[in-house]
Image (tube, helix red, strand yellow):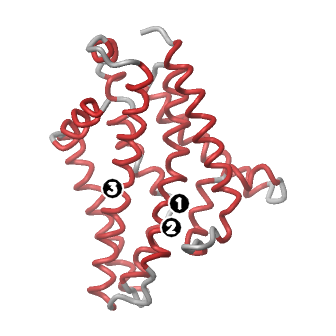
Amino acid sequence: MLNLMRADFYRLRHSRSLLIWEVFILGFTIFTTVNWSRSNHLTGWLGVQLINNNGSLFVWLLPLILLTIGHDFSQQLLKDTLTMGISRRRYFLSKMVTTVVAIALQLLAIQLIAFIGGIIAGGLGQMSWGDWLAQWLVYVLLVTTEITIITMILYWSNSTTAAIAMGFLVLLVIAILHIQFVNLQILHYVDWLISTSQLKTVHLNSLGNITKPVIGAVILVIGGGILNDWRFEKMSL
């Protein structure tokens, strides 16, 4: 399992597709931060909060999910990988861990650029490292719901295109329904896309206004993870 994770990270580090995407997303983050500094009294902490409140990160992270979860499917390497002696469960767990770690590092890189840009523009600001850590961990959890849904669709459809398109579409439809039916309680637990706008209410000792989305995310990640593991064990290659 560890060897497979190391191989995945090695492949990602030497991936031209990932390099191109990193130049684009980090360049766009720099451009956005500069624009913020012109219209706001931007500080390092405010830059991080503005990044966190941007639900479009769910879209920007899709290619990275594709390069980790979907790589062996799109390149038809899955069968060869499993014949090397790794069990299906270990393969599944290694892909999940690799993807979550990669996403966490990507979020950290984006936040770091906004943070440095904010410091250059207006200083550090009233920074709370504990709140930052709590918000970063919660954001990683919310994005893990996207990973879980995409993996679920991929394992049932065997199509990376369908998985990426439908995975994000599910989250988007939920967000639209939540806007239309604000009082429908179930949507408060599953609208992870819009809930990012409330990340600033998360503190080290409190989940603030996104307690329900966090509860829903934990249920989906655990329940969906068990279902995905079962499906992967049963699917034919």
Residue 88 left/right relative to 135: left
Residue 173 left/right relative to 67: right
Quarter occupied by the N terminus:
top left
User: Which residue matches tag 2?
Assistant: 135
What residue is shown at x 62% (from left), y 48% (from top)? 218
Q: Quadrant of residue 89?
A: top left
Q: Is residue 40 above or below residue 79?
A: below
Element at badge 2? helix
Nearest the viewer among 136 and 117 is 136
Q: Is residue 104 above or below residue 208?
A: above
Disc 1 residue crowd, few under 14, some 14–19, many 20+, Cα 10 Å: many
Disc 3 residue crowd, few under 14, some 14–19, many 20+, Cα 10 Å: few
- Residue 32 percent location from the top left of the image: 36, 71
In space, the residues marked 3 and 2 are separated at their CA atoms by 14 Å
User: Which residue matches tag 3?
Assistant: 105
Type of amino acid under label 1: Val
- Residue 160 percent location from the top left of the image: 42, 27
- Residue 97 percent location from the top left of the image: 39, 40
What residue is shown at x 47% (from left), y 35% (from top)? 164
Pointer 3 with pointer 1, Cβ within 8 A: no
Element at badge 3? helix
Q: Earlier in the sequence, mark 3 or mark 1?
A: 3
Pointer 2 with pointer 1, Cβ within 8 A: yes
What residue is shown at x 63% (from left), y 68% (from top)? 207
Type of amino acid under label 2: Gln
User: Which residue matches tag 1?
Assistant: 138
In space, the residues marked 3 and 1 are separated at their CA atoms by 14 Å
- Residue 188 percent location from the top left of the image: 74, 56
Q: Earlier in the sequence, mark 3 or mark 2?
A: 3
Element at badge 1? helix
